[in-house]
Amino acid sequence: MRYRNWGRTVAFSPAFYAQPSDEEAIRRLIGQAVEQRRTLRVVGAGHSWTPLIETPDFLLSLDRLQGIISLSPTAHTVTVWAGSRLYRLLPQLWETGFSLRNQGDIDRQSVAGAFSTGTHGTGKGFGILATQVVHYRFIDGRGRLQDVYPTESPDLFRALQVSLGLLGVITQVTLSVEPRYYLRLLTRVEPLEAVLEKSAEYLQQYRHFEFFWFPYSDWAGVKLTELSPVEARRSLGGRWIRDFLWENAAFWVLNKLAQYFPNRCPELCQFAGRNMGEGVWIDRAYRVFATARLVRFREMEYSVPAEAGPEVLREIRRWIERHQPAVSFPIEYRYVKGDEIPLSPAYGGDRVFIAVHMYHRMPHTEYFRGLEAIFQAYEGRPHWGKMHTATWSYLERVYPRLGEFFALRQQYDPEGVFLNSYLRQLFGEGLQHRVAESVS
Ligand SMILES: Cc1cc2nc3c(=O)[nH]c(=O)nc-3n(C[C@H](O)[C@H](O)[C@H](O)COP(=O)(O)OP(=O)(O)OC[C@H]3O[C@@H](n4cnc5c(N)ncnc54)[C@H](O)[C@@H]3O)c2cc1C
């Protein structure tokens, strides 16, 4: 079989593709991979741009392990199969009376796939999505099935929260959930500078705050979300207009124009910036969080220390004005609460996440490289699932506990069964360092 990811940045043909339907089958497959000295990677929904899932050997999908396993209405926790796709799981959860505390921008990912790369949403009070996990069950490279709780094994638990599949195959996840709730989303267009100046106020005032800024334009499309006591009066027509007609169909036309007339990108962006959708929408939380993304694109995202966010965006703006890149996608600005997870881009303090995108049929390299230099000048940390060119020596500097993660990893994957060539190259020095330490 030939596997392609959503972003069309990864394509490969694994020798074995398996969709195990129980944990014992996963254990056997890991055993076979170790015995044959082959690599084994797990794929979720294939929504990462980096080649995390690529392998010439064993590719595992947990698509047959989906859904709710058990629910504790008193403890407000739900245990789910790790392969569950969010868009199927969240309506099921709603029917049981619960919702996730926070979500990202889309709901196509699998639970383990999304959480393992540090996927995040936005809001002053909300960490990356994996901060909602209270228990993991996983099978390591020695074939051991383990239940991991933060109180009993805090280091292993935190390592699992963002693990890139490097510790083993996660089979079950227990999430802390909230009684189901409605959200009210207000979208409006405001001058970019005014939004940057008001961002602290917005973060304080609203449960979730983010904005999109079209390069070359003076305008930002702001999304302000708060709890709604009012039950949704669903307007399917309104949702269709927002999701399909504006966010996707009109946006696709805009990107086609940019592709064929790249020197007109400034005018196209100015037009799009002024005409971003405005309105109010109340609905079930999981529906308000998620957007349909039908126009394919490439993305790079870095987190920077929260206080540097506005300055980084202003510097990006100056770079764009100087270099005039052909780009027709907006830049997204979000806020995430700090955590203690070694591989989390929000480790050690609150961060602003800035994501830059490029239509998939337009060249992205120079644009991303130019902006990556700005992110790195502010000690930015790359989102593991999104495109970046950071190397070990840089990563080691900005992720202070990277070494610890790799030391721990040795215990769970001594044969390196979960390492593909991309990960060996990315973390090569770290891996060699660990081997050298254990030899001496
Ligand atoms: C259109 C689009 C919108 C996005 N929006 C956001 C957003 O709002 N916020 C954000 O932070 N990110 C966002 N992302 C990035 C995306 O959330 C991450 O790349 C995420 O990891 C993808 O989840 P997935 O299920 O497709 O996992 P995959 O990409 O398939 O896998 C990701 C990693 O998880 C590992 N993995 C998967 N399953 C398991 C398992 N059972 N056990 C162990 N390891 C496992 C894989 O081996 C791999 O290393 C977006 C991506 C796209 C394409």
Image (cartoon, rainbow, N blue to C red):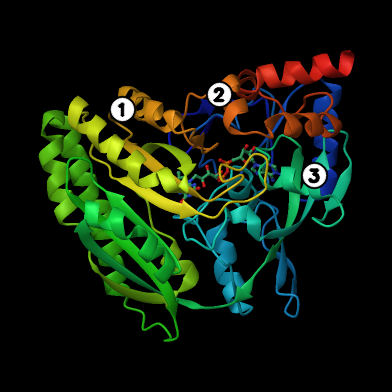
The label nearer to you, 1 versus 2, is: 2
- Which image quadrant for residue 277? bottom left
First along the sequence among labels 1 and 2: 1
- CA distance separating discs 2 and 3: 24 Å
First along the sequence among labels 1 and 3: 3
Q: Nearer the viewer, residue 403 or 103?
A: 403
Q: Nearer the viewer, residue 53 or 437?
A: 437
Residue 384 x/y as whole percent: 55, 36
- CA distance separating discs 1 and 3: 38 Å
Any atom of ligand 1 within 8 Å of the CB at mark 2? no
* Residue at image location 44% in from the left, 63% down from the top: 289
Residue 18 x/y as whole percent: 70, 38
Residue marked by disc 2: 394
Residue marked by disc 1: 367
First along the sequence among labels 2 and 3: 3
* Residue at image location 28% in from the left, 52% down from the top: 248
Q: How many marks?
A: 3
* Residue at image location 46% in from the left, 31% down from the top: 387
